[in-house]
Amino acid sequence: MNILIHPTYFPSIAQFVAIAKAESLTFEIHDNFQKQTYRNRTYIYGANGKLQLSVPVIHSHKERQLYKDVKISAKDNWQLVHWKSLESAYKTSPYFEFYEDDIRPLFQLKSDYIFDHNLKCFEIITACLQLDIAPKFTSNFNKTPTDLTDYRYLSNARKEQNMPLTPYTQVFGEKHGYINNLSILDLLFNEGTNALNYLETQQLP
């Protein structure tokens, strides 16, 4: 299966199910940026339940702006806030310490563009998963591609299908129950070296 998908901020588990099953991966780089999508946000499991982490971006005054041209805002010290949130949420998880040294530098990295930052996050996460896949990039925008399986909708939290995923043990599961399809970080910190096998055994819609 050859898939088309958006690079997002620490992608959802559903996105990584598609990626893990793909023979080849193509990232869309010619679409317009859309607000309220996973392009600059992700969801983790905090002590009080589902927690959104958003990367602040600088919106253009133009009506449309290409995703790859959207800059990250330096305000609010967001990287420190995100890292502290991850530490608080996952410090007692089975594999947080195992991956901590790989993941932490991403929260010290100074990227100008959200697209570029997401690519760096993707590179580190695939290395942690021991998933060997090198992304290609689109050369133009095609609304209805015929040669690729289109999973771009998985980057849109509002349109995303509720993919039924097999429950796994989560840190605060006894308190709030199982929360489906969080960031790949939730799976990685809880399942560790079994994460890739988990992804490969899930079913796509």
Image (cartoon, rainbow, N blue to C red):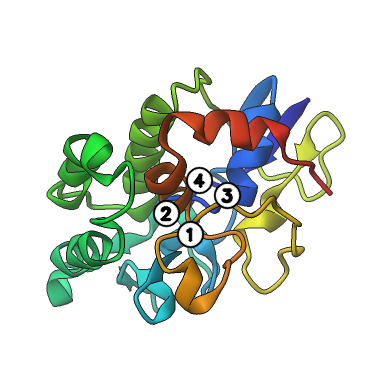
Above or below for 48 versus 99: below
| C-alpha separation, residue under disc 3 versus residue under disc 4 | 13 Å
Local SS, label 1 = helix
| C-alpha separation, residue under disc 2 versus residue under disc 3 | 12 Å
| C-alpha separation, residue under disc 2 versus residue under disc 1 | 6 Å
Read off the residue under disc 3: 13
Q: Where, by quadrant of the figure, is residue 95 drawn?
A: top left
Contact (Cβ within 8 Å) of mark 2 with mark 1: yes
Earlier in the chain: of badge 3 and badge 4, it is 4
From the image, state whether disc 1 or disc 3 is nearer to you: 3
Q: Give amino acid for label 2.
A: Tyr
Q: Give amino acid for label 3.
A: Ile
Read off the residue under disc 4: 7
Q: Residue lying farthest right? A: 146
Read off the residue under disc 2: 9
Where residue 184 appears, as percent x and y from the top left, is 48, 48
Local SS, label 3 = helix
| C-alpha separation, residue under disc 1 versus residue under disc 3 | 14 Å
Within-10-Å neighbours for mark 1: few <14, some 14–19, many 20+: many
Which of these two is toward me, 55 or 94? 94
**Quadrant the N terminus occupies:** top right
Classify residue 78 as left or right of residue 44. Answer: left
